[in-house]
Amino acid sequence: MTVLEGLWQHEYVISNGVKLHYVTQGEGPLMLMLHGFPEFWYSWRHQIPEFAKDYKVVALDLRGYNESDKPQEESTYVMSEFIKDVEGVIRGLGYDRCILVGHDWGGAIAWKFTYAHPEMVERLIVLNIPHPAKFAEGLRNPQQLMRSWYVFFFQLPILPELWLQAFDYEALANALTGMAVDKSAFTPADIEAYKDAAAKRGALTAMLNYYRNALSNIGQQEWSLLEVPTLMIWGEKDTALGKELTYGTEEYVRNFQIRYIPTCSHWVQQERPELVNQYIREFLAEETVG
């Protein structure tokens, strides 16, 4: 255990009928962090101590991941349930609003939660995840469809689980280090931590169930203009999500800014943590435009 890990506290909160695990550090206003696939709270290891200086940082294990409950019913892994999970976490921690930070799937949930409950989000920060409307547009583009091949593969029963866990979770490890521009961003210990989280009983199927329910909701919503101040950080060398998905986001968000990071992959907050932390701090220091 590192010195920083010694400062983190592992806690649980009951939300929307499930027990969710989280790591927390610091006191003050709530900063809630939501991870993506195939990660868990650990993907925020470089951000937790930095922002714990000024906030109560809570890095959640989403339902189905790592130490959080893993409901067996595939039907429980839908956006409406994820939104209730986040609402319950915020209220269960004794807050009525937060700074919401999300990456990948966590970012998708953060977008939808902010639309559902804008009064509960002081500021929204999303990393390498497009606005839902832009992603729906992207899936009509053959190039993005090819990048998103795994989304369609994950619709299959059983086979994706077998593929991910084969040869000591080689595919999972390759998803992290293989996509990274700076391979040193993931130490062998980091990869083992991700493997251990995915190996927990029921975790792989739960993680994949996010995708198995995802396609039914794409393109079915009308999007109003979001009023919550929003920062998007984007690693430009993301092989899963093209940079063009970010273009035109300002049409959906009134107070929007984007910071691109060249030579950086999808795993932006792990690969370039100092720069990500700097951009977040600059955004949080700015006055809200009235």
Image (spheres, rainbow, N blue to C red):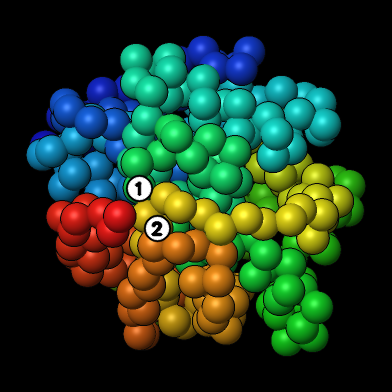
Crowd tier of the residue under label 1, counting other residues whose Cα lies within 10 Å: few below 14, some 14–19, many 20 or above: many
Q: Residue at x 68, y 30 (%)?
A: 81
The Cα atoms of the two marked residues, 1 and 2, are separated by: 6 Å
The label on residue 233 is none
Q: Please provide percent x and percent y for residue 217.
A: 80, 50
Mark 2 is on which residue type? Thr
Classify mark 2: helix, strand or loop: strand
**Can residue 207 be spotted in the picture?**
yes
Mark 1 is on which residue type? Arg
Q: Is residue 107 left or right of residue 101?
A: right
Task: Please determine whether, in this image, residue 259 is positioned above or below residue 107.
Answer: below
Task: Please determine whether, in this image, residue 99 is positioned above or below residue 260.
Answer: above
Q: Please provide percent x and percent y for residue 44.
A: 34, 48
- Displayed quadrant of residue 191: bottom left
Q: Residue at x 73, y 86 (%)?
A: 143
**Can residue 6 be spotted in the picture?**
no
Classify mark 1: helix, strand or loop: strand
Is 120 in front, or is 145?
Answer: 120
Is 177 in front, or is 59?
Answer: 59
Q: Residue at x 36, y 69 (%)?
A: 257
Q: Residue at x 82, y 54 (%)?
A: 220
* Furthest-right residue in this view: 157
Q: Which is nearer the N-term, disc 1 or disc 2?
A: 1
**Quadrant in which the C terminus is drawn:** bottom left
**Quadrant in which the N terminus is drawn:** top left
Crowd tier of the residue under label 2, counting other residues whose Cα lies within 10 Å: few below 14, some 14–19, many 20 or above: many
Residue with the mark numbered 2: 230
* Furthest-front residue in this view: 290
Tell me whether the residue at label 1 lies in contact with that at label 2, contact meaning CB atoms closer than 8 angstroms. yes
Q: Please provide percent x and percent y for residue 144.
A: 71, 80
Task: Please determine whether, in this image, residue 71 is positioned above or below residue 51.
Answer: above
Residue with the mark numbered 1: 123
